[in-house]
Amino acid sequence: MKQIKTNTIVIGAGQVGLALGYYLKQANIEYIILEQGFEIGEQWRKRFDSLTLFTPNSLNRLPAYSKPISQSEFQTKDEFADYLQAYQQHHQLNVQCNQKVNSIKQGDMGGYIISTDERTFYAKHIVLANGAFQDGAGNDNGVKYSDEQNVIKHYQVNDLSDKKIAQQLVLVVGDGASGRQIAKQLAKNNQVYLAQGRTRHLIKHKLLGINIFHWLRASGLLTLNKNFSLAQWIKGRDPFPDTQINDRTLMNAGVRFLPKLTALDSVAHFAGGEKIVIDSVVWATGYRNRYDFIHVADVLNSNGDITTDKLPKGFFCAGLAWQHNRASALIYGAKFEAKRVVDEITKL
């Protein structure tokens, strides 16, 4: 298999990966962006139909491209996928799709060897930009499961776009922003139960008629260093805006709230002893990142997560949740994360 050589390989053609491509091109650094999907934006399109971004459109623009992206205040998943495709075409960024990375290894003479199903690449620098919210966490919360007859259908939060769920008793596990949007969507054609977990902190999405994220940006809270005590407090509470997904709105839509799910067999069991019969369960318990393709020393810790503070020379990551601040994993933060990495590459 022929080895393709370049200066920098970027993994992932999402918002951070494309912003990296823009800044690398501006710096005249040779690069290739590898995208596992058949097209840019594919991962966004796979998600549930009612998904909308909770940051306003004016904060969802990548560098040097201000094309209108939605007629409403919040973009849908498909509108943002369209925007990513338009951004790549506008800047003629070097993206190779259908290139799922199977392994990253350190080269014998330095640099990195990246292998996909079809090709092998060699690069002096590599940047992981494959997103902070990759795979649904599923049953990562220790729920006892013994449905030996497989009578309950299971769905993941990031793979719902082509699933037809109607006239069923549906349990949504996880009442974060995604879980609430999914419950509201499914309640139109199903009886929906929403299993809660830890205490949620919803905030009004507008203050004095202005979107809360504009206030957060103006106050500096979006880009406040993660090590500051105030940033740690915000991270611990993990607030998200109430875009018509508060308890009252969901209950009016027919969603019934239940306590924490404790077990699943032929029925669902909850804290406090209640049991209900369900047909399907949607796991909206958050996301987990997958790094089992990385075979480079000093990159992963004992939990299999990225050790962002001690990466080897030439190895970078960008856009992880709270990597530097609250904005790191937001679309708004993509340009800052990308510029930071490219500035580091130019110094090497």
Image (tube, helix red, strand yellow):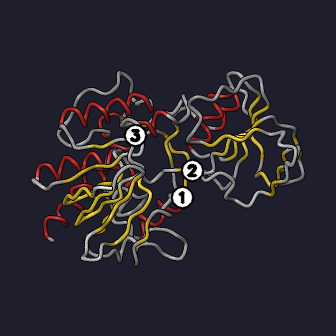
In this rendering, the answer to whether 260 lies above or below 142 is above
Residue closest to the eye, 41 or 339:
41
User: Which of the two discs, 1 and 3, labels the residue nearer the N terminus?
Assistant: 3
Q: Is residue 219 left or right of residue 256?
A: left
**Image quadrant where one finds the C terminus:** bottom left
Closer to the eye: label 1 or 3: 3
Q: Is residue 42 left or right of residue 84?
A: right
What distance separates the C-alpha of mark 1 from that of mark 2?
A: 7 Å
Amino acid type at image mark 2: His
Q: Is residue 38 left or right of residue 202?
A: left
Look at the numbered disc 2 and give the secondary structure of its residue.
Answer: loop
Q: Residue at x 56, y 33 (%)?
A: 48
- Asked where in the image residue 275 lies, by quadrant, the reply is top right
* Coordinates of residue 291 in the picture (x, y in percent): 48, 62
Look at the numbered disc 3 and give the secondary structure of its residue.
Answer: loop
User: Residue 215, can we see it?
Assistant: no
- Please give the label number shown on residue 55: 3
Residue topped by disc 1: 237
- Asked where in the image residue 125 lies, by quadrant, the reply is bottom left
Binning the other alpha carbons within 10 Å of mark 1 as few (below 14), some (14 to 19) or many (20 upward) gives: few
**Image quadrant where one finds the N terminus:** bottom left
Residue topped by disc 2: 201
Binning the other alpha carbons within 10 Å of mark 3 as few (below 14), some (14 to 19) or many (20 upward) gives: many
What distance separates the C-alpha of mark 1 from that of mark 3?
A: 18 Å
Amino acid type at image mark 3: Thr
In this rendering, the answer to whether 195 lies above or below 187 is below
